Image (cartoon, rainbow, N blue to C red):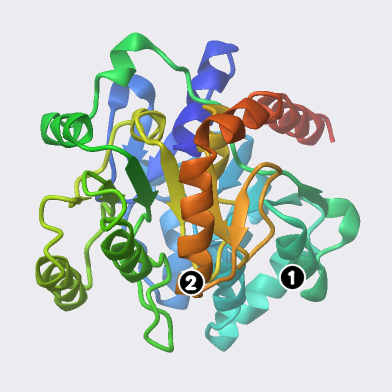
Amino acid sequence: MHIKRLHRRLIQDGIHSQVYCDPNGVVNSELAIFPRKPICRKPWCYFSWMFEPGYNIVAEIVHLHYSWGALAPSVLAMLCRGKKIVITVHNQMDEAMRWNASPFTRIAQQLVVKSKNVHWIAVSEYVRSQLLARGVPDNKITVLPAFLPPEVTEESKQKLPEDVSIFIAEHSPVLSSYGFRLWLDDQGIDVYGIDMCIELIRELKVEFPRIGLVVCIPDIQLHDYFAELKSRVMLYGLESNVVFVTSPLEEGYPLWQASDLYIRATNTDGDALAIREALSLVVPVVASDASPRPEGVILFRSRDAESLLREVKRALRDNDAIKSQLATCCVDDNFHVIRSLYEGLALS
C-alpha cells in the first residue's frame, strides 16, 4: 500500500515512476506497475538479468522495498550500471534474517553497505541500530516511518467486500486485525497473534454477545495452521463472530474506519502501516509492546492474553474519550521527505 501511494503521488507531481512487483502481484500497465521477473539464485544470474532488454530499469534512482539482503548481488549490478539506490528496511525481524545468506551474497551485501550511492530508510530507531551494527554509516540512514496517508473518498469507503460490509453492519463492537501472511516463527508462535485474537473474542463474547472480529490475512501458506484456527473458532462457537478475509483488499483503511478498535497482536514488528493508518482515521489501536509504537497506541504485554483482554476492555469502555484524544494527535505525511531524498540523490 505504501508503494502504491508513493507511486501515485510521484506521478501526480509529474515525476516519472515505475513499479516492479512480485510476479504474482497486481499488474497495471496504465499505472506503470509491471511484474518483476522471477530471479535465478545462481551467482551469475544476478548480474545477467539486469542487462536483459526485457528487464532494463531505465530510472536513475531505484527504491527497493523487497528483502534486499537476498538480492544484494542484483543491487550491486545496478550500482555498477550507475544507479543510485534507496533501500527501505521495514521490519526488524526481516532485517536480522536478511544477513543469513551464501558467502557470495554476503560479500555483495558488504559492498552494498559500503557504497556511497546507497541511502537507507529505517522505519524505526531499532532498525537504524541494526543497520549501524552491520556497518551502514549513520549519515546514510534516514529514520522515517513508511506511512503515507490514504486518499479518503466516498467511493473507496464502499470498496469492502459485500460479505464483510454485511458482517460489520450486524455486529457491535467490531474489531479488526491485519497480517500480510499467516506466519509462525521459529518457535511455532503465531507472529501476528491471530490465535490471541480468537481467544480474546471468546472472552469478550460473554460481555459483548454481538462482538465481531474481522481478520484480514491475504496470504495463506500455512493451510494446516489456518484449518486449526478455523477449528478453534468452531469449537468456541464463534462462527458468527469471526470472519477471515483471505483476498487482498484494494484499500485497507475502509475496514479500519468501520471498526471500533484495531488490534495488532504481533510478537515482532517494524513500524506497522496499518497502525498509523488507523490512528490517522481516529480509530483506537491496541498493540503489543513487541516494538516501539506511535503516540496514541494502547499497549499490552506481548503474548500476554490477560494484558490484551484488560486493555481491549478499557479501550471499548473509553472508546469515545480515546477518539477525542486521537483527534488531537498528528500523523505525519512523509511524502515530501522521500521526494527531497530523491532530489538530493539526483543532484549528488
The picture places residue 173, in percent across and down from the top left corner, at 33, 39
- Front-most of residues 113 and 242: 242
Which residue is disc 2 drawn over? 306
In percent of width and height, residue 198 lies at 28, 64
Identify the residue at image location x=29%, y=45%.
25
Numbered disc 2: secondary structure: helix
Viewer can see residue 147:
yes
Pointer 2 local density, CA inside 10 Å: few below 14, some 14–19, many at least 20: few
The quarter of the image holding the C terminus is: top right
Considering the image in quadrants, where does the N terminus appear?
A: top left
87 or 41, nearer to the observer: 87
* Lower sequence index among marks 2 and 1: 1
77 above or below 149? below
The residue that appears at 45% across and 72% down in the rendered structure is: 305
Q: Disc 1 marks which amino acid?
A: Gln
Farthest-out residue, front: 207
Can you see residue 47? no
Q: Amino acid at mark 2?
A: Glu
Residue that numbered label 1 is attached to: 130
- Mark 2 or mark 1, which is nearer to you? 2
Relative to 215, 189 lies left or right:
right
Asked which quadrant contains residue 233, the reply is bottom left
- Mark 1 nearby-residue class (10 Å; few <14, some 14–19, many ≥20): some
